[in-house]
Image (tube, coloured by chain):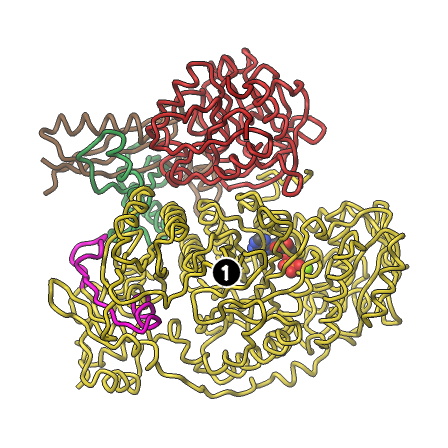
Chain colours: A red, B yellow, C green, D brown
């Protein structure tokens, strides 16, 4: 394997770590396993915080994982402009760690929801969406119980104003509306980025959307964007 | 003399042991048991652990077959899938705790069945959840239903094992007695099956996972309340709090231990806790065991030896480890954040000896706890009135509802209606191998790195079981086989959960025996041995008992997952009915929902025809002749076609088969039938194949358009049917307005 | 009269509390020591309109017993009753 | 010195509380009226070993602020500090 090295962190209770590693491999990257107690990212070019229930999601999703030793390395990597993708529980961890603004709260229906949905890409100005046109609709699955994005009004205005909303839940044709929003998320937000566009968090699961035998394929362009942005061996 | 409790009743009776059973214990020990020993026997000789009422009948089930690597007797059955891979699978009941605390009861049920599969050294890859409740109009039933579903999801989602299929059915008799079963499937290398007999002299017994508390000591708690002066059953709820996070760590740690070859054996701690795990490990190894109760990590202070020995605290496993592997074993556990403790070792004298503070507190022959257990041949009798109910055949009642209205009402009937509300609460895709999740006839899980896949389903029909337990047992196997075949998989093997009332009632025991006879005959005819299962008796409360509720979990094998069939209709296809339709509305969904009659005899079952249908569909799928398939079950042909139309958002126009009255042709539940659809170019090959295999086949129409047209009888819009079908359960729960219901569009 | 009540629902003593356990086990790795016996439960606040303090409290008792807790596994206690406008 | 603390964590006022809402909606269906403004939060109990009451409270403050609550969405308060053996 020779593609860019993409680390996937395993926290106690991570569940989609193997799936993320598999997706990296299928899309041509070199998967790197990183353990929550590690203090570095094993020389990886990019890092994925996978989905799951780290520490059982006790207290709040991501509340305990953000204290893991490896998170200092993730913060440094992000600081240097390195790509960081938080998927589902990974998104929750990034918010808890302050690497992304806002918080993810109980779904409005109070129930876990596993469903194939669609998201509309809102910006190409992130490492993970550089090959995706704004307005493009991607089929991806969601599966979470705490995915309703909230932020205080100023923060929300800033995220929106700076074009940092990366994905919104939408209809297959790209329309917004309550019936397409699986968790009641503010402004139908499914994913956001930091100000430099190198840290992205999203509730849907692109790693479960690369292999047509077992799901939709809306995750493929995200991995393509990433692998293009970090050529191997840089 | 047997020890008497304060109230004068001998303790053994309060522990659920009869006087004869007490005498057996005295004979086995050659003396009176002490309290700890009595607790151990009481737990091990309970119906739940000893199968004392069911064993004589369970022997009648076929258990052997060319793929069977491990049959009944171990924690799970194991079958060979080829290419060096094997599959462990098992089903179990957790109905009783779920009836009083639905969330935790169901969640701990999932945890337990996962550990049964884990203890074979298998990675759990799928869960299924057959459920039975009383009608949702009753708020208590809604509370149970929502709680159970939340608990199953809460556990399965958190351990990262996809819940890929299941069943929900409703029957007033399940109101006070909901049935909550859970099935788990695991994968492992065929040459690395962990068996309980793997230990040898000097091996260490290492307890891994949660601390031990006063959990689920159940009947044995009377020892504490009556003789030790503690408050009693009230502060010993028979429900435990599930800890799926601990289970996830336990799964990873145990699999790493197995992968690294550090395990001589692995046992889950279920009923009768440490006593059961240690005695089985020792007995299977032909050894004895020394246990040091002081070494057991406890959650509470002041636990008595009998409590430690019989506690059923969750999320614990017992590893059998060679002394030289101990350090590595502990290192793995530590890395996963789990407590491990050496609580004993295997000895050569055949005795299970427990010490506390150096003092021997219990000493029994390890084999005695299992081998000396009583075996009952309980009295059996045909239930009064059954013959009359069977004679009251609703097939010949005249219909009062137009066929189109009847179809919509059936699609909205809770037994038939979409269970999306349930399965969208389950993570069905984690692990990345779910080729087909909930919503089809059977789930399909791809075997990673291979073209092969397994197909999974659970089935059981309470009406059939009530009206004719023999047929109820047989149909549950037949329907499961049909479901597996309809995704293109060959049925391989079966696990079951037999949910019944009290075995002490002759009608229940008769029904139990009949069910097993039917199940056994069907399994033999379809070539699917039973590799394990579970019996849940005493499902009685408030003066009502559940009907015979046998649930079959079936495993099928697809040699190429790309050839799997779906049940979503596509336009432009020729639509065929395979099999023959008879005038059989007895026990049908139509009879119950439209005619208000649960009577008559269930449809007949010609097992040779059933095997023929299954073989035909599998071969047609193998040869890539079919575009899709859906079996006929509840609601007959009409519901089967409507479900396919809803799933594919595609209509059809068909004529009715045979010259039966139209409502019979539409809604008869005759067995051994499926609808299939295929590209017209494949028609000659299919017809030829069916003829050669002797399966009746009839081209009934074509697919396409927005409407469902059955001859002159029904003409309904697919979207209308879909709305009725999808909204029924949320409507009953009063949620239709609140939570957005979005249909899958991917 | 309107009163604001607080109801605390905790797992019965002796029952495993996985949430408390997970928090407690994580504390040392975050650099905090000396914290033990962590238990996590629910805290519910609600406003009651009733004729008297007694009537209000009786109502809260009922709600706590039948809706907010399952007495099979949980105990509840009512913390305070503050008058609100 | 060992003290038992109780920490209450509630969603900030103004933050939607779907759980509180669900409880509130369930009340009338169970035949109760006059109950409003239901909020559901967390109740955490923990024992602290520290040199002084002040040190203990400071530690609890830290844990409540950094771990038990998320300041983006939640407020916490420390209820009581009872001495235990
Ligand atoms: N409790 C449940 N959990 C998961 N999936 C379920 C559950 N209940 C029903 N389903 C799914 O809904 C679909 C329809 O169920 P059912 O009508 O019982 O199927 P069938 O008649 O083919 O046996 C199946 O795919 C089944 O797996
Ligand atoms: Mg079916």
For mark 1, give the secondary structure. strand
The quarter of the displayed image where residue B655 is located: bottom right
Residue positioned 54% across, 51% down in the render: B163
In this picture, which residue range is highlighted in magenta? Answer: B277-304
Residue positioned 53% across, 31% down in the render: A203
Can you identify the residue that label 1 sits on?
B88
Q: Nearer the viewer, residue D34 or B49?
A: B49
The quarter of the displayed image where residue B617 is located: bottom right
**Relative image position of residue B714 (x, y in whole percent):** 85, 57
**Relative image position of residue B456 (x, y in whole percent):** 60, 58
**Relative image position of residue B417 (x, y in whole percent):** 66, 55
Q: Is residue B210 left or right of residue B672?
A: left
Q: Does B444 appear above or below B9?
A: above
Q: Does B104 appear above or below A126?
A: below
Q: Identify the image quadrant of the C terminus of chain B.
A: top right
**Relative image position of residue B742 (x, y in whole percent):** 64, 39
Residue positioned 57% across, 77% down in the render: B515
Tell me if residue A162 can be seen: yes
Q: Is residue B301 magenta?
A: yes
């Amino acid at each position: 394997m020779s593609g860019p090295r993409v680390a996937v962190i395993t926290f106690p209770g991570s569940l989609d770590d193997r799936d993320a590693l598999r997706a990296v491999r299928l899309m041509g990257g070199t998967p790197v396993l990183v353990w929550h107690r590690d203090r570095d990212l094993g020389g990886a070019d990019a890092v994925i915080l996978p989905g799951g229930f780290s520490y059982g999601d006790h207290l709040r999703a991501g509340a305990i994982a953000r204290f893991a030793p490896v998170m200092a390395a993730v913060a440094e990597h992000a600081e240097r402009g390195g790509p960081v993708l938080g998927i589902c529980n990974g998104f929750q961890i990034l918010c808890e760690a302050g690497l992304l603004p806002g918080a993810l709260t109980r779904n409005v229906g109070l129930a876990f929801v596993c469903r194939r949905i669609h998201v509309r890409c809102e910006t190409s100005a992130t490492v993970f969406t550089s090959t995706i046109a704004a307005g493009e609709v991607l089929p991806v699955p969601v599966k979470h119980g705490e995915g309703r994005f909230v932020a205080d009004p100023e923060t929300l205005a800033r995220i929106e104003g700076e074009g940092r909303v990366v994905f919104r839940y939408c209809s297959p044709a790209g329309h917004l509306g309550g019936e397409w929003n699986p968790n009641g998320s503010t402004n139908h937000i499914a994913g956001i980025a930091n100000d430099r566009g190198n840290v992205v968090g999203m509730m849907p699961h692109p790693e479960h959307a690369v292999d047509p035998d077992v799901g939709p394929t809306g995750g493929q362009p995200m991995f393509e964007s990433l692998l293009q942005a970090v050529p191997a061996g840089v | 003399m047997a020890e008497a409790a304060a109230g004068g009743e001998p303790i053994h009776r309060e522990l659920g042991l009869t006087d004869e059973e007490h005498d057996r214990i005295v004979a086995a020990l050659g003396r009176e048991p002490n309290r700890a020993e009595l607790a151990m026997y009481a737990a091990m000789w309970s119906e739940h652990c000893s199968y004392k009422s069911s064993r004589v009948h369970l022997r009648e089930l076929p258990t052997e077959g060319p793929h069977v690597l491990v049959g009944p007797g171990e924690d799970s059955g194991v079958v060979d899938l080829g290419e060096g891979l094997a599959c462990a699978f098992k089903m179990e009941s957790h109905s009783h705790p779920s009836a009083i605390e639905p969330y935790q009861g169901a969640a701990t049920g999932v945890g337990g069945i996962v550990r049964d599969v884990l203890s074979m050294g298998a990675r759990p890859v799928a869960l299924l959840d057959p459920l039975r409740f009383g009608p949702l109009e009753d708020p208590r039933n809604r509370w149970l239903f929502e709680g159970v579903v939340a608990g199953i999801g809460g556990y399965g989602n958190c351990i990262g094992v996809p819940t890929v299929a299941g069943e929900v059915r409703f029957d007033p008799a399940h109101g006070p007695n909901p049935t909550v079963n859970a099935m788990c499937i695991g994968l492992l290398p065929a040459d690395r099956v962990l068996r309980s007999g793997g230990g040898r002299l000097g091996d260490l017994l290492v307890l891994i996972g949660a601390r031990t508390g006063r959990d689920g000591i159940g009947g044995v708690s009377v020892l504490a309340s009556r003789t030790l002066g503690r408050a009693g059953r009230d502060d010993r709820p028979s429900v435990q709090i599930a800890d799926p996070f601990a289970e996830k760590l336990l799964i990873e740690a145990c699999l790493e231990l197995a992968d690294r070859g550090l395990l001589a054996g692995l046992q889950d701690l279920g009923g009768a806790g440490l006593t059961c795990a240690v005695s089985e490990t020792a007995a299977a190894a032909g050894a004895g065991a020394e246990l040091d109760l002081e070494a057991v990590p406890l959650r509470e202070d002041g636990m008595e030896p009998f409590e430690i020995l019989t506690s059923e605290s969750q999320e614990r496993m017992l590893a059998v480890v060679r002394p030289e592997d101990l350090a590595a074993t502990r290192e793995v556990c530590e890395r996963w954040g789990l407590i491990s403790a050496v609580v004993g070792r295997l000895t050569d004298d055949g005795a299970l000896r427990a010490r506390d503070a150096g003092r021997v507190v219990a000493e029994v022959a390890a084999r005695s706890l299992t081998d000396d257990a009583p075996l009952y041949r309980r009295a059996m009798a045909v239930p009064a009135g059954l013959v009359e109910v069977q004679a009251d055949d609703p097939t010949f009642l005249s219909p009062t509802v137009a066929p189109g209205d009847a179809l919509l009402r059936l699609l909205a009937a809770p037994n038939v209606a979409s269970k999306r509300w349930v399965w969208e609460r389950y993570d069905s895709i984690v692990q990345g191998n779910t080729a087909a999740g909930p919503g089809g006839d059977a789930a399909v899980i791809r075997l990673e790195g291979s073209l092969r896949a397994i197909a999974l389903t659970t089935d059981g029909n309470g009406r059939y079981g009530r009206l004719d337990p023999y047929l109820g047992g047989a149909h549950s196997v037949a329907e499961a086989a049909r479901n597996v075949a309809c995704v293109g998989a060959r049925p391989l093997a079966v696990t079951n959960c037999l949910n019944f009332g009290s075995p002490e009632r002759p009608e229940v025991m008769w029904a139990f025996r009949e069910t097993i006879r039917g199940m056994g005959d069907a399994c033999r005819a379809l070539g699917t041995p039973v590799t394990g299962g579970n019996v849940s008796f005493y499902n009685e409360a408030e003066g009502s008992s559940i009907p015979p509720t046998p649930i079959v979990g079936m495993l099928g094998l697809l040699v190429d997952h790309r050839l799997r069939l779906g049940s979503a209709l596509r336009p432009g296809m020729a639509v065929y009915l395979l099999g023959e339709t008879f005038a059989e509305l007895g026990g049908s969904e139509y009879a119950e929902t439209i005619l208000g009659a649960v009577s008559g005899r269930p449809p007949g079952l010609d097992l040779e025809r059933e095997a023929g249908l299954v073989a035909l569909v599998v071969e047609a799928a193998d040869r890539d002749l079919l575009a899709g398939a859906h079996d006929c079950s509840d609601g007959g042909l009409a519901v089967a076609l409507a479900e396919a139309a809803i799933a594919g958002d595609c209509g059809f126009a068909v004529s009715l088969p045979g010259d039966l009255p139209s409502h019979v042709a539409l809604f008869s539940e005759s067995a051994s039938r499926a609808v299939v659809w295929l590209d017209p170019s494949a028609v000659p090959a299919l017809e030829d194949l069916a003829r050669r295999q002797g399966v009746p086949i009839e081209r009934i129409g074509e697919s396409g358009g927005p409407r469902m047209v059955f001859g002159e009888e029904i003409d309904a819009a697919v979207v209308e049917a879909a709305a009725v079908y999808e909204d029924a359960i949320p409507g009953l729960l009063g949620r239709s307005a609140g939570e957005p219901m979005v249909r899958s569009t991917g | 009269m309107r009163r604001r009540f607080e109801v605390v629902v905790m797992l019965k003593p002796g029952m495993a509390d996985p949430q408390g356990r997970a928090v407690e086990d994580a504390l040392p790795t975050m650099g905090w020591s000396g914290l033990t016996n962590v238990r996590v439960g629910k805290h519910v606040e609600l406003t009651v309109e009733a004729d008297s303090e007694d009537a209000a409290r009786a109502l809260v008792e009922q709600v706590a017993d039948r809706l907010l807790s399952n007495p099979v596994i949980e105990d509840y206690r009512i913390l305070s009753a503050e008058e609100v406008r």
